[in-house]
Each structure stands twice: as C-alpha cells, then as structure tokens.
Amino acid sequence: MELRHLRYFVEVASERNFTRAAEKLGIGQPPLSQQIKSLERELGVELFRRTAHGAELTGAGEAFLIEAQRVLGGAQRAAQAAQRAARGETGRLRIGFTGSAAFNPVVPALIQRFKSRYPTVDLTLEEANTPALLQRLLDDEIDAVFFRPGTTLPEHVQTHRFADEPMKIVLPSTHPLAAKKRLPLTALADEPFVLVPGPAGVTLHDEIVRACGEAGFSPHLAQPAPQVSSVINLVAAGLGVSIVPAAIAQVQVKGVRYVDVQGAKMRARLALGWREGDASATLGNLVGLL
C-alpha cells in the first residue's frame, strides 16, 4: 500500500464518482478503477459499492476513510516539518556572547530580529569570555558567538566585523578627576586599575595595555574582575579605575563616572563568528539578517 493509493481512495470517496475523481487526479478512469480494486484486494474488503450514478462507501470504506485521511494529513505535516527545518524556520540556534558585547546595541537588536523572524527556533544564549567562546564554537557546543577579536582573527572561524566602538575611562565618582569630561591616558599613570586579566579578557585587556604603553606607562592591576560587566561595581567600590567599551556607559551604577579618552586611539572590536563550512540553515538565517 502506497500513499498514492490512499490519495486515490480519498478522492473517489470525496467525489463519490470515479470519472470526476480521475479528472481531478489527472489520470484515466480505468487506471483509477484498477488501483482501487487492487487496494480492495490487498485489504480483503470492499471499500465502494458501485451505483448507477457513481460509488458509495461501504461500512469498511467509511472506517478506512477516517484513517486514510489521518495518514495523508500526517504525511503532509511531515513534509512541511522537513521543509521548515530546511529553511531554518525550526530547530535550534546556540549563541554565545561576551559580557561587554551584550551592551553593544547591535547584539540585542540582531537577536531580537532573529527571534521575531523565526519564533519557532529554539534559541539559547550563553555568556562567557572570548577564549572560552571560541573554543566552545570550535568544539561545536555553540553555533555563533559575539566576541572581541584581537588583531588577528582565529583560524577556522568566519567572522562579520561590526563597527569599532570607542572606549571610556571609568572613575569612582569621588575621584578628583571625576568632574572632567575627557582625560588623557597619562592622567591614569599612577592609578590602580580594575581589569579583566588575560586570558579571560584577552582582547580588551591587550588593547588597554597597548594604549597605556603608547602613553608611556604600564597599568598597575590592583583588582582583577571576572567579567567586564563586574568592573563597574568594583570601580564604584573605590578599588581602582578602568577603561571599558563606550556601550558599558549605559550601566548607570551609583558611585561611578564615565569620562571620554582624550588623544589616544582606543577601540573595542566586536564581531560575530561561526565555524567555517557550517551549513546549518538556522545559522544561515542569522547571518542573513546581518
């Protein structure tokens, strides 16, 4: 028994006439009659009672019709499910992001657009530092990552770079320099720093160390922080000063002041990365929204 046999049967049952059913199916009436007879022989029952005006369902035919429609409906749903999955409209997408990347408006905007466009995709989010995210990406534990790339991009990872982000100095609000609108990095030469140390924050850490080195000093790490987002609270507690991506300034914690960097060319890089050759349709849809 094949699905076409069920479709033929359901069409004849709907039309109550072999000739009209054959016309709708696009086949000849004799072949249709032969297919129905073959089905009846296989089942060992009579499905139709032939009449002068067409055909009527027997009791066995009425019972068979209910199940035949259910099977055909299930086959159609299975086909539609496969087609939706192939289009990336279902399935899952695992996205990782760094603590500082989450504050850049392009990250929540892209995630929101994806969720709005593909609401039936199972979307999971995970926060970690850049090295951990890249390793989990290469280990196929995450599908895409928003990360802070260094001057060289990681191997086997395709990337889309977003616009570089300026940096800001973060000071305790009680600091003598907190009233300034902008400061050169040299003003921080003797200050204790609160930083995410390498390798946990390797890309931002290196950018800060590089810029301070060009300004003629090495920042003194007084207090390490597990994530960039926690730097702000540690600065508010008076444990030191820091430098963060400008988007972090939307974190309005009592006791801190954000000050522009004067002179130094400091930029926080941001990218979306995914494994080379990943043919996932859901990932393709995310990249397509870029």
Image (cartoon, rainbow, N blue to C red):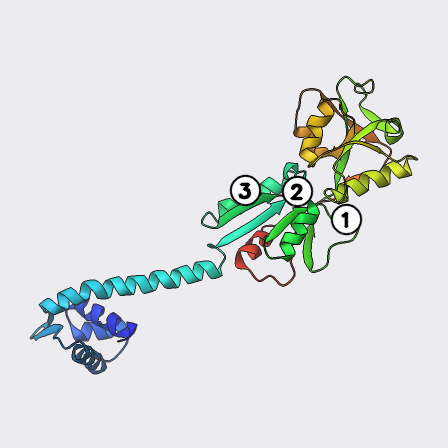
- The structure residue drawn at horizontal position 85% and vertical position 41%, both measured from the top left corner, is 210
Mark 3, Cα crowd under 10 Å, few <14 / some 14-19 / many 20+, is few
Which quadrant is the N terminus positioned in? Answer: bottom left
Residue hosting label 3: 112
SS class, disc 2 = loop
Q: Quadrant of residue 79?
A: bottom left
Out of 43 and 132, give the one closest to the viewer.
132
3 vs 2, front mark: 2
Q: Which mark is drawn over residue 150?
A: 1
Q: Position of residue 236 (x, y in %)?
A: 71, 23
- The structure residue drawn at horizontal position 60% and vertical position 61%, both measured from the top left corner, is 278
CA separation, marks 2 and 1? 14 Å
Residue hosting label 2: 98
Residue 113 visible at all: yes
SS class, disc 3 = helix
SS class, disc 1 = loop
Q: Is residue 207 above or below residue 160?
A: above
Q: Is residue 184 above or below residue 2?
A: above
